Amino acid sequence: MKKILSAFLLLCFTIAFSQEKKPMFWQDIQEFKKQDQQNPPPKDAILFLGSSSFTKWTDIADYFPDKKIINRGFGGSRLTDLNDFAEDLLAPYQPKQIIIYCGENDFADNHQLKAKVVVNRYKAFYKKIRERFPNIEVDYISIKYSPSREVIWPQMKIANKKIAAFMKKEPNAEFIDVTKAMEDANGNVRKDIFVEDMLHFKPEGYKIWTKVITPYLK
């Protein structure tokens, strides 16, 4: 009986340990792999990578009906996660363009985080993209000023400015600034385009993004 109990405890420990070793968002990545197996991703598509602003854009293909879209946003992700899962996010695809929205959660996780840290995280991911896709278009959507995260707007503003300067120097790269389009006539962030959490968009928010993003699409 003791041997059976010992074996059972060992099995429980092994299972628990294996689950602990799995990094955050591991399950999201497995789901992407499952989707790719069920529906092989098209070549020459536009690959959207990033956090929940993309994850919740579940009908993104309807906003760009004449484009081939692959949405690989996973909610809560940070630029550190894009770096950690870079191989899984890039290797399965042959896109003609990559559009990134990420960085907001980096600041949200640590309100004391310096802008240069987030900028360097982005540069590291950009480098990984270029190692695999040296010539395709790569665009970065500016970090949005969510009303619920006003306390970290100052760092976001600095990061946006530095990433914009970096992208300006890079070939086949653009910084897509959505800031002005999300403001009212007085220059304040429109709260009416957000759902109750003042973080994620209503359809109106995505319509605004669509209008800004469309001219950059290949």
Image (cartoon, rainbow, N blue to C red):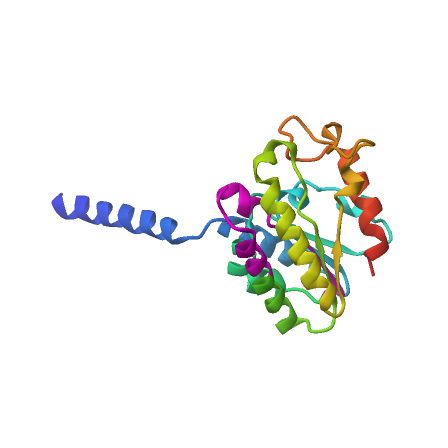
Give the percent coordinates (x, y) of residue 78: 55, 50
Determine the image quadrant of residue 104: top right
Say whether residue 176 is visible: yes
Q: Return the residue nearer the eye: 88 or 36.
A: 88
Q: Return the residue nearer the eye: 4 or 139.
A: 139
Q: Is residue 49 above or below residue 135?
A: above
- Give the number of callouts: 0
Seen in the image, is 172 located left or right of residue 54?
A: right
| Residue occupying the point 70% across, 62% down | 167
| Residue occupying the point 62% across, 29% down | 197
Give the percent coordinates (x, y) of residue 89: 60, 60
Q: Return the residue nearer the eye: 39 or 154.
A: 154
Seen in the image, is 17 located left or right of residue 112?
A: left
Give the percent coordinates (x, y) of residue 71: 69, 51
Q: Is residue 58 above or below residue 46?
A: above
Which residues lie in the magenta part?
95-122
Determine the image quadrant of residue 148: top right
| Residue occupying the point 66% across, 47% down | 143
Say whether residue 91 is visible: no
